[in-house]
Amino acid sequence: MAFRPLAISTRTGASAAISVVALVFAALAAVASRAEFGSGLGSADWAAIRFTAMQALLSALISTLLAIPVARALARRRFWGRGVLVTLLGAPFILPVIVAVLGLLAVFGRAGWLNAGLSAIGMPTVSIYGLHGVVLAHVFFNLPLATRLLLQAWHTLPAERFRLAAQLNLTPRAVFLSLEWPMLRQIVPGVAALIFVICLTSFAVALTLGGGPRATTIELAIYQAFRFDFDLSRAALLSLVQLGLAGGAAVLALWIIPSVSLGGGRDRPLRRWDARGGWQRIPDILAIGTGAAFLLLPLCAVVWRGLLGLPATPTSVWLAAGTSIGVALTSVVILLALALPLAGWIASARQGGIEGVGLFGLAASPLMIGTGWFILINPVADPFALALPVTALVNALMGLPFVLRILVPPLRDTVQVYGRLSQSLGLQGWPLWRWVILPRLRPQIGFAAGLTGALSMGDLGVIALFADPDRTTLPLQMYRLMGSYQMEAASGAALILLGLSLGIFWAFDKGGRWHADA
Amino acid sequence: MKYLTLAATTFLATSAYADTPELVVYTYDSFVSDWGPGPVIEKAFEETCECDLKFVGMGDGAALLARLKLEGARSDADVVLGLDTSLIAAAKETGLFEPTSVTADYDLPIAWNDDSFVPYDWGYFAFVHGTDLTPPTNFKALADSDLKIVIQDPRSSTPGLGLLMWVKAAYGDDAPAIWEGLADNVVTVTKGWSEAYGLFLEGEADMVLSYTTSPAYHLIAEEDATKSAAAFDEGHYMQIEVVGKLSGSDQPDLADAFMQFMVSDAAQSVLPTTNWMYPAVIPADGLPKGFETLITPEKALLVPNDAVPALREKALAEWLSALSQ
Amino acid sequence: MLTLENVVITQDGFTLSADLSISPATKYAVIGPSGAGKSTLLGGLCGFIPITKGKLLWQGTDITDAAPGARPMTMLFQDNNLFPHLSVLQNVGLGLRPDLRLSKDDRAKVETALSRVGLADLATRKPGALSGGQQSRAALARVLVQARPLVLLDEPFAALGPALRNEMLDLVHELVTETKASLIMVTHAPEDVRRIADQVIFVANGHAAAPQPAAALMDNPPPELRAYLG
């Protein structure tokens, strides 16, 4: 015990982990406690489980693999608009599902730009609907996230290493093998597992782009069990399967991550000397260009539509926007309170398995958590009064795995590099966080807070289960507009949502990187 | 002294507040949105009732029922507004609803004789399309055409379930064959009405499952006459939306007054242009201008409330197997 | 007095044994071939590497399992002796108060130490803006404010040029003399030994020999040491 590399208290980390698990399982237990009869899982449910696992696996693999060249290119190149592009990478991920789907369809749909272009040059049109459409949409959502996570990892490679590589005149291939590949081996499995879990709970995207009931996911089956059959035992059972799949992915990915430190640098500004040759620019330009077009075109559609709809947007949308900002900021606070001790614990542990805890909140069906907590809260308090705090909490839980993914690797490095020095100075507890960990991790904390805030802004979340008309969030207000034929006003609301989410993301991210070189 | 005054004022304010009875009405989300009937109806009813009417919006009709089942007899709600004919049997099974004496001279295509639920508006499901195409006149013609349609999933949406019952009511045991014919026309299936309608407006499909009254919205609110609903000669399936009183209500009289209000002229004249459905009782001034342009189905289809649950199970299995090929 | 009673230090399958004691206000050089276990010895003393057998005693008190920060010693590593995100003043201040709540007195102590090592004007700089020699001085200023009875150096000046290194060694010599601390310094260079050490601990083949007077040993090395010195 005496020889842990850094005196980070495991107690706070462990209690954060226990809170997360308890939050999820309390909800599950509450749902199960109200189950009256058990119908078990039918063949349709097993088909849904198979489809869910397959689409999530494909989406995770493709998103991660495509993110590698894009992130590599972004890490190597400095160009005008790079900062904006990196910020915009956060956008697809935080868009409400229906907005993103409409944006994608504006490009890839039957009447979309792609097919208009194809038929203009006499080519046969393509259909987006089917498994490939589901994967395409999930890649649209998650490629940017994967790219950001990988880019972050690329930035943790110390400048000294690249200097050494430049010194030795290493070929790009050698740079990749000696510097980048070891880093990727550490980062990629976690990123893939994360995306797999995100895609597990997909419902509306999978159904809409999957083109029909073939594309039934577990989440849809859970929804059906809650809403149409009111079969709580089946809902609980399906939620368990969903958690089980996520757990399996987490275990698989996290245990193969080698816990090797990438070593420390001296905080020199990052400069790259490799890959300067003219011909080497081409793949990078291609990667960035294709990635940007894939992400930005649907976004442009969203923005364009939103601008048209903005005048039709009622004032209630702005009120809802205020509420949403409050929820988002609360989520950030809750999240950091959970994630930092948890990350500290994970980083100083030998095995990475604990990180799987973070995936729990994300893998659990939001409908299940919402319903479970509704059952728990209802007898003791007015669920409406707790609507916003519960929404903030659930949104924070969803952000947890991303944030752990962001915080753990640099925290592990900090432990490796400054652990001995901190220990020899007797730094522990709050001073250790205050003077060593927080300042070392500031860029990552800013990124994580921005991501969570934005995610919380854009998520419909459990508010739909609790909401009363006086306190709605922006996404809910947007759905209400759509439900009242107000598609234009809803587009305007979506644009406001996009703007605010990106604003929150940008503010935190910028705040974190301000005066930080990494 | 100051504190005492403050405390006294607070106390008075609270007791004054407590003297105003509060009526809690659970309803679906779009009812309470700025554009829905909620705000107008709340204002109009509060002028007559000397009470505080509180709408609580949550999802759709199915979400309402699920919520009631979760809350059981402890529910704060006095009235539930927005269940429809396909949910009535399941709602009654909960035993949470109280029979009511409220009634009215309904203008419904069918006779209404349920003792617990009061219908406030209704509509026919229909496929909405742009006026630039010649619509098919029945499901068989639709299946034979190259037209693309967007529909809603019956497992997650009320119109989706309506379509399921429509085909079943019109074709009975031949329903699977109809669905197999339709499979290649279905572009995709969405979670709810909003998504499907949004896709249709974006040009992703030629037709979308909605209501015969949808074109009235475009005509009246947007002065856009380019949308129409296809009249099917098998008849159109109906959706009747109802309001009911919970036995656990602490304001039973107020609840009755509200339900009576919902079928009065004041509420009924608001519904057509906010909820975009037919009023259950045609108001004295008649239907709003523009409604006369809508198609009027020759035959109204409706599966009896108590037969819905069993039929739904069977129809859903047929639908799944036909569209999962 | 620090006593190593039949100590065995184990790290990743490598073991180092030692049975010796360190006298107050004495300067020791630890020398020996690469990989012989010099750094392991210091890691064991500081508490970063477990002592698997034997006892480590400080003034008769068992500190075998004490946390690194709770031992009567301060250590400078080969690298990463300063936090790059903190100013020189804060880095030195950590030696006094791990929570950096520096009182007026503490501040004065830090400033005195910085003047003592010649960094008074650079107190607000971050380590990245300092030269290698200045970074070493900053780390030494912290050793000074910590004022622990034992100072352990693991080749902290290896990267500096000969003149600068001698300057640093002289500074270390002065500082430990002022604070009456004992110095244990790992080094590769025989001239360092002659410059600063009173005693030499020769480490070879997984064993740290008992200290011997430096001058005599260097003038007349035993065969193993002779082989190492070349």
Image (cartoon, coloured by chain):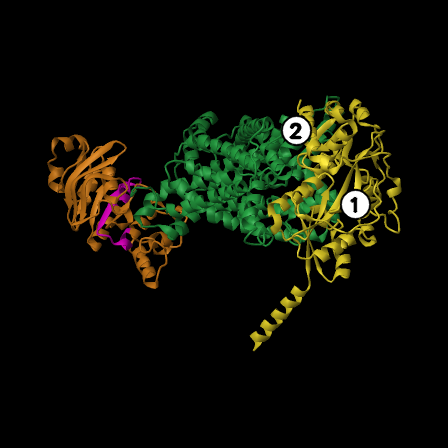
Chain colours: A green, B yellow, C orange
Q: Is residue A123 left or right of residue A394?
A: right
Measured in 3D between alpha carbons, the distance from the residue under mark 2 to the one under mark 1, in whole angstroms, is 31 Å
- Residue occupying image coordinates x 74% and y 40%: B85
Number of disc labels: 2
Is residue C202 at all visible to an observer of this figure?
A: yes
Give the amino acid at mark 2.
Answer: Pro
Tell me the magenta residue range: C143-166
Query: Does the residue at mark 2 contact the one at mark 1 (Cβ under 8 Å)?
Result: no
Q: Nearer the viewer, mark 2 or mark 1?
A: 1
Chain under disc 2: A
- Report helix, strand or loop for mark 1: strand
- Residue occupying image coordinates x 61% and y 47%: B72
- Report helix, strand or loop for mark 2: helix
Q: Is residue A73 left or right of residue C224?
A: right
Q: Which residue is mark 1?
A: B121
Chain under disc 1: B
Q: Which residue is mark 2?
A: A213
Label 1: few (<14), some or many (≥20) within 10 Å? Answer: many
Residue A500 spot, x, y in % from top left: 62, 48
Q: Quadrant of residue A62?
A: top right
Residue C195 spot, x, y in % from top left: 19, 44
Give the amino acid at mark 1.
Answer: Asp
Q: Is residue A440 left or right of residue C9?
A: right
Residue B96 spot, x, y in % from top left: 66, 47
Quick check: is A155 in the magenta stretch? no
Query: From the image, which quarter does the C terminus of chain B lie in?
Result: top right
On the same chain, marks 2 and 1? The answer is no
